[in-house]
Image (spheres, rainbow, N blue to C red):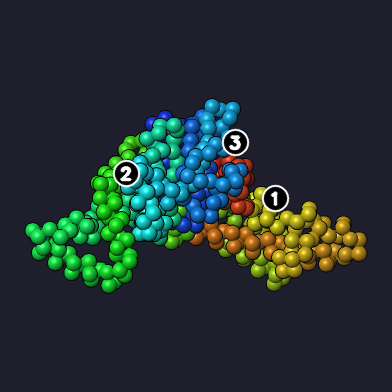
Amino acid sequence: MGMDVAPELDIDVLLDDPQTRIVVCCGSGGVGKTTTAAALGVRAAERGRKVVVLTIDPARRLAQSMGIDALDNIPRRVEGVGDGDGGELHAMMLDMKRTFDEFVEAHADPERARAILANPFYQSLSAGFAGTQEYMAMEKLGQLRARDEWDLIIVDTPPSRSALDFLDAPKRLGSFLDGKFIKVLMAPAKVGGKAGMKFLNVGVSMITGTVSKVLGGQLMRDVQTFAAAMDTMFGGFRTRAEATYRLLQAPGTAFLVVAAPERDALREAAYFVERLAADQMPLAGLVLNRVHGSGAEQLSAERALAAAEILSLTGDPADPADPDDALANAAEGSDPAKNDAGAENLADGGFVDPPSGNAQARNPSAADPDVSPTSADSSAERLAAGLLRLHAERMQVLGREQRTHDRFTALHPEVPVAQVAALPGDVHDLAGLRAIGDRLSVPLERTKRAG
C-alpha cells in the first residue's frame, strides 16, 4: 500500500552472529518490548546461543511466560528451551535496590558498607531516586558482561517516559553522586573547625543552612552522613557509568527499537533512532509489533462498503457475472475462510450475524426446513453485508498503520524494519513466545500469505 519501502531486518542473522553479544530492546511503554526481548531470548537459545534475558518490566509477565515462579536479581535457567540445540536460556528481573547494595558492598570495606546501607538517605536513593533504575540496569548489564557466562545478553530497558532517559540516566546519576552539590554537602564533615578554613565554613554553612530549610534538618544530616561514607566511592560511579556507556557503543552491541504501528509509538521510536545515531550507538533496526493483515487486501474498504450498502438497500444482489457489479467485485478473491475479518466471525461451524449477534448456519434453509427461501436469502444478504463492513473496518486499520509506517520510513529510510504480525491473544507461555519469534523472523507478507 505504501510507497516507502524500508530495508528488511533479518532477526535470525543478528541472533546467529557470534559477534553479537548484547541486544538492547528499547522503546516507549506498552509496545511489547518485554515480550519481544523474551521471544528473542527463546529463539536465540533454540538456535544454539547461551542467552540471559534481563528485564526491568514491573508487571513480571516475563516470569509467567517462561514458567518461572518469580524472577529476581539472579539469572535462573528456563527449562525446556534450547535443551536439544546446545543453547540455554536464563532469565532475571532487575532488583534495583539489591543491585545498588551489591555495588556498595563490592566497593567499600565491610564497616563502611554497613553504614551506607543503613543510612536513610541511601535507602531512599536506592529505592527510587530519579534515574536510579536506568543506572542500575546498566550496572547489572556491566556485571553480566564481565562474568562472561553467556554469549548473548538481551536487555529489556525501563519504560522511560522520555526516549532520552535511558541513555541519560547513568551519566546523570553518576554526575549527581560525583558532583559539586554532594561535595558541598560533604564539606562540613571534612573541614571541621580548622581555623584556616573558617571563611570557607561560613560560605558552606550558608549553603547547607539554606538547603536544610528546604530539605529539613534530619534529611540534611542523613545526606551529609551518606556523602561522608560514600566519599571514596564517588569516582567509581562515574567510571562505571562511562565504562557501560562505551560497552553500549561497542560493535558487539545491537539496539532494537520496538514500536507499535501507531503515531505516538513511532514518533517515540524516531526520537530513539535519532538519539542513538547522535550518541554513535549501534542500531540494528526497528521491530514493528502487532501489525494487522488481511487475506483479501485486493478488496478495498471503499468497495466493500459500497457492496454492503447495495445489499442493505436493495436486498437483491445483481448478477455476479456482471464485472461491474459491486457485490461480484467484493466476492472475487475473498474466501471468508481466508479473510481475517470473516474468520474472526466463525462460531461453532456458522457465522455470527453482526446486527443480531446470533450464530447463523451456513445453509439456513437446509438447517431448518421451515425457513422459506425468501427469509434464507434475506439472512444471507445481512450476513454478507455484515462481513463486508467488518472487512472494510479491517482495511481502514491497515491503511492507518501503513500511512504511519510510511511517515517513519520517509524520515529514516536507512533503518531496517521487522514487522511482526499481530497475534489473536496475549502471550502467556513459551508457545506464545515461540510464535512471536517465528513472526519476527518471517517477513510480514509471507506471514499473511501463509495465514
**Which residue lies at the image location 22% right of the left edge and 57% below the top edge?**
189
Point 46% across, 57% down: residue: 29
Q: CA distance from mark 1 to mark 2?
A: 67 Å
Give the distance between the C-alpha atoms of the residues marked 2 and 3, in whole angstroms. Answer: 37 Å
* Residue 448 place in picture, x, y as percent: 58, 46
State whether residue 138 is above or below residue 219.
Answer: above
> Can the viewer see residue 418 in this picture?
no
Q: Amino acid at mark 3?
A: Glu
| Nearer mark to the viewer, of 1 and 2 | 2
Determine which residue is flagged by label 3.
79
For marks 2 and 3, the one nearer the N-term is 3
Q: Horizontal and vertical percent for residue 307?
A: 65, 64
Q: From the viewer's side, name the closer residue of 348 and 374.
A: 348
State the residue at coordinates (70%, 58%).
345
Q: Secondary structure at mark 3?
A: loop
The CA span between labels 1 and 3 is: 37 Å
Residue shown at 17% from the left, 58% from the top: 192
Q: Which residue, given by chain and number where applicable, does mark 2 sit on?
A: 108
Tell me the kind of residue under disc 2: Ala
User: Which one is earlier in the sequence, the residue at label 1 or at label 3?
Assistant: 3
Q: Quadrant of the C terminus?
A: top right
Label 1 belongs to which residue?
337
Which image quadrant for residue 84? top right
- What SS does tag 1 mark? loop
Foreground tag (1 vs 3): 3
Instruction: Tell me the kind of residue under disc 1.
Output: Ala
Q: Nearer the viewer, residue 255 or 294?
A: 255
